[in-house]
Image (tube, rainbow, N blue to C red):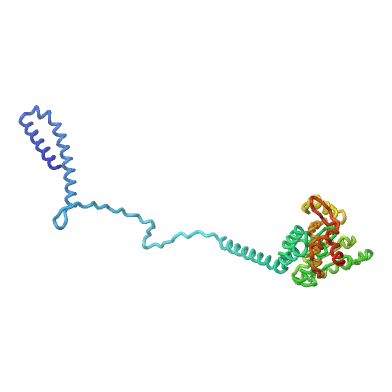
Amino acid sequence: MVDCEGVSMDTQVEKERGDEEKEGGKSASILSPQLKAMIRIKKKYLKKSNSVRLAHNTNSVVSDGSLHPKSPQTRKSKRRKSRVLFPNDTLICKPKKECSRANPFLLLFSLIVFIQVYNAIENLDDHVLKYDLEGLERSLHREVFGQPEALEELMDHLNDYLSTYAHQKPLALSLHGACGVGKSHLGRLLARHFRSVVEDKLVVHYLSKHHCPLQDAARHCASKLAQRISEVVARAEEEEQIPFFILDDVELMPPPLLDILQTFLQTNQTNEFLNVVYVFLSSLGQREITTHVLQNSSTAGAYKPLRQALSLIHPLWTEPAVELIPLSLLEREHIIQCFLEEMTLEGFYPDLSNVERLADELAYHTAAGRQYAKTGCKQVVGKVNLL
């Protein structure tokens, strides 16, 4: 189609050129600019069409003489290499990565901290297992009636203190309660347990009625107690163990004995006297505890009035090392448990109707629909012996 148009245009141009020659110079002078423009357009058009046709013919020729269209080849663009090319006669010196000299020390420090923490955790487990505090807790909850809050607080203090060997102050647990709530029984259980897990000589069960019955010999008793504490602490330091001092009937101790105990609770002592556990058992403050329990049905919140009352008796209970643990009054159901336990130990058949009758013979406080025994389980043993 392009060739036909080119031929027709050529014939038209030749025809017009012949007509112009025939008509003369006047018409030639008028049409000459138009002819020149058409000739220029024709030349450009023919040149473009010839170049396209030539390229088409070269791509269509194959070896067998047949013609078929061929897809134009695209020229691949060369990718520039990212690495730097150095001359052959020069050395390649790559830049070194900057590495901080503190990294090895940081890794070493992290390793040391990890080992220390791991050893500390292992030591905590070893100390707790050595004293068998889980067995002690089960024994106390099984044999001490009506004191779940006090026993829980007692075990919390023992677990925290006995989990390590080095301390900044001794541990003094001061248990207070009314008559018959189980103070002496609790002291015997503690002494029996710790004698079974540590050496017997490292556990001292001090009874004021037995070891210092006379008030006139108070100073002599105080010096003997101080000497015994020093000897036991020195022995425990050699064996790297914690000694236990369980002191019962503290309300009967004369002031010189309390003064000696206060000196051993100071924090400005040598290290061996800071790794000691003291357990004080007394009925001091029983009036404040009884009033608080009858008003609130619990010992929670009784610490403040109890500490105020004890601070008026002796400054021993103002020491920061002393932890107060109030014992609650026993309810009627706890008295029945005491009767069943004592009758079983004495070989009696625990008849529930007989136990109810014996429990009714005791005197009780009544508050908020509850009955609290005035003398606790104190009279249970005597009642059972009369059977």
> Quick one: 290 or 31, which is closer to the camera?
290
> Quick one: 217 or 297, which is closer to the camera?
297
At x 81% / y 70%, what residue is drawn?
A: 347
Q: Quadrant of residue 156?
A: bottom right
- Total labels: the figure holds 0
What is the x, y in percent for residue 238?
76, 72
> Quick one: 198 or 330, which is closer to the camera?
330
Residue 170 seen in the figure: no
Q: Residue furthest front?
A: 353
Residue 38 seen in the figure: yes
What is the x, y in percent for residue 56?
18, 49
Compared across the picture, whether 80 is left or right of 364 comes to left
In which quadrant will I find the C terminus? bottom right
What is the x, y in percent for residue 246?
81, 65
Compared across the picture, whether 358 is left or right of 111 comes to right
Compared across the picture, whether 71 is left or right of 111 comes to left
What is the x, y in percent for residue 97?
49, 59
At x 10% / y 30%, what residue is drawn?
A: 28
Q: Residue furthest top?
A: 26
At x 93% / y 63%, what residue is drawn?
A: 215
In which quadrant will I find the N terminus? top left
Q: Residue furthest right?
A: 216
> Quick one: 299 or 26, which is closer to the camera?
299
